[in-house]
Image (cartoon, rainbow, N blue to C red):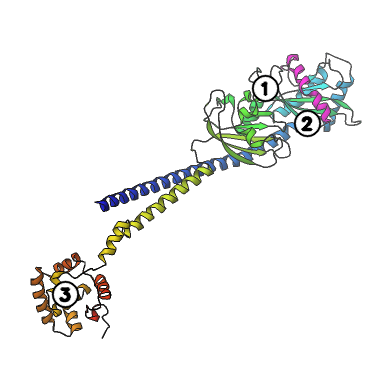
Amino acid sequence: MEGKVRTKRMSWLLSASVILAVVSLLLLAVNFRNSLRQRSSMEYAADKLRTQARRAAELADAIETISYQFLTNQILNETLASYVADQEAYDVSRWNVIFSEHIEGLAETVPELRDAVFFDAAGKTRIPLTMSDSLTRALWIPVRASIMDKALLADGRTTWGILDVDGSPASRTDAPAQSILLCARLIKHRSDRKPLGVLILLIDPDRLARTVSGFSQEEGIAVSQKTDYSILLSGRETILASVDPSFAQRPIAEVIPGYNEHFGGKTAITESGGYRCRAALGNGAKKAMYGVVYCPIPDRDWMLVSILPISSIALSALGTTALALCFAGAVWLVFSTLRNTASGGNGNEGAAASRRQTLAELPTWYSALTPREQTILLFLLTGKSNKEIAYILDLREQTVKNHLHFIYQHLGVSDRFSALRLMQEANLTIESLRGYVDSHPEFSVNKRLFDPQSP
């Protein structure tokens, strides 16, 4: 009864081990597939981002080239010098015609250019030169206050900034959803290098984002947890452009998942990279898995960041290791159970097998046989045929058959198979007989029973 219980327990353990091994292997396969999907998505986003970064650099160069022409083009430079030297404070049309025609011509090749304005470096109350009549005083006053001082300090280098459409600082939490990207440069006279004024180019951030990443609010694409989007950052951690203009008013950590944890306050990123993290974007949003890849813009301190939601979740390195150990343990348990089953399953069955190899005494029916019949019966244990037994014992085959006939009658069996089964039930085997001979020197058998080569 105990043996049956142990056998049933071993069978249950083997089944459970196999199921655990199969489930662990399936989970590892699913995790491996999800890891490949994540890696593939991240690699694709990284390749795409490098192209977008080059595009952003080319676009920034094109915008800066517009302001640079006022330094190198003699006609434009003299026009600005004449405007600065004149005392007229209101009627600036004769200079504005040349200024606006030139800027409008350049805007055809750089459609991201929304407008432009030139301020006299000394006369803060003068009417500035503008590209279009739509640039009113209500807008150019906050534009000048936002970036002109920075451009003067830059001393001829381009300066970038961002301004809300109502002139509010971009950091205000109650600012409107739209903003304007500004590119400013101090223009100097070609001959004496004296400062003339500051040229400020107004860039549409949405058009810039569309050029860089291919998305635009005008096309009806809304940012959500189901769509990927790109963010253009300056070296001062300012959002210059994105698919959603409202991002300009939000902290970077709210727009880029895992920004503070991964970048750790860094402002200058010189190498491309990426990471995955779980975060909640927006108030009340549930946490989701995101992939973030970033790439520095060539020859400037900007960085382009792409955020893509990840639907296929892969385990962390610790989780993958734990799952692999679970699979390895299940496999070990399967082989260990199989080995124990093959060797007898447990100690009780092994002891029973040991007892089967020990012959305490000969069965009574064996002693009733003649010595010749005993020898022939024992040779049946070797699996030899009647002819082989006759050859070993130097008898005729018919004689062996006759003896076997009398043996079967005496034992009450009908054939060789029944006789072998009777001996097995009596624990009479070659192994047990060998042990019996060793422990009973007075008992002798034909030596060729154990060694056919014996004389």
Secondary structure under badge 3?
helix
Q: Give the mark, 3 or 1, whose residue is nearer the N terminus.
A: 1
On the image, the x and y values in percent for residue 242 come to 63, 29
Farthest residue to the right: give it. 192
Secondary structure under badge 1?
strand
**Residue wearing tag 3:** 377
Question: Whole-Å distance between the Cαs marked 2 and 1?
Answer: 19 Å
Question: Whole-Å distance between the Cαs marked 2 and 3?
Answer: 112 Å
**Residue wearing tag 2:** 158
**Residue at the spot 64% in from the left edge and 33% down from the top edge:** 260
Query: Which amino acid type corresponds to the residue marked 2 in the rendered image?
Result: Thr
Which range of residues does the magenta coloring cover?
A: 130-156
Q: Give the mark, 2 or 1, whose residue is nearer the N terminus.
A: 2
Kindly report the secondary structure that dominates the magenta region of the rendered protein.
helix
Say which quarter of the image contains residue 190. top right
Front-most of 152 and 119? 152
- Residues at circles 2 and 1 in contact by the CB criterion of under 8 Å: no
2 vs 3, front mark: 3
**Residue at the spot 37% in from the left edge and 49% down from the top edge:** 17
Front-most of 308 and 371? 371
Front-most of 272 and 318? 318
Q: Residues within 10 Å of mark 1 (few under 14, many from 20)?
A: many
The label shown at residue 179 is 1
Left or right: where 453 falls relative to 193: left
Question: Whole-Å distance between the Cαs marked 3 and 1?
Answer: 108 Å
On the image, the x and y values in percent for residue 22 come to 39, 47
3 vs 1, front mark: 3
Q: Quadrant of the C terminus?
A: bottom left
Query: Which amino acid type corresponds to the residue marked 1 in the rendered image?
Result: Ser
Query: Which amino acid type corresponds to the residue marked 3 in the rendered image?
Result: Leu
Q: Residues within 10 Å of mark 2 (few under 14, many from 20)?
A: some
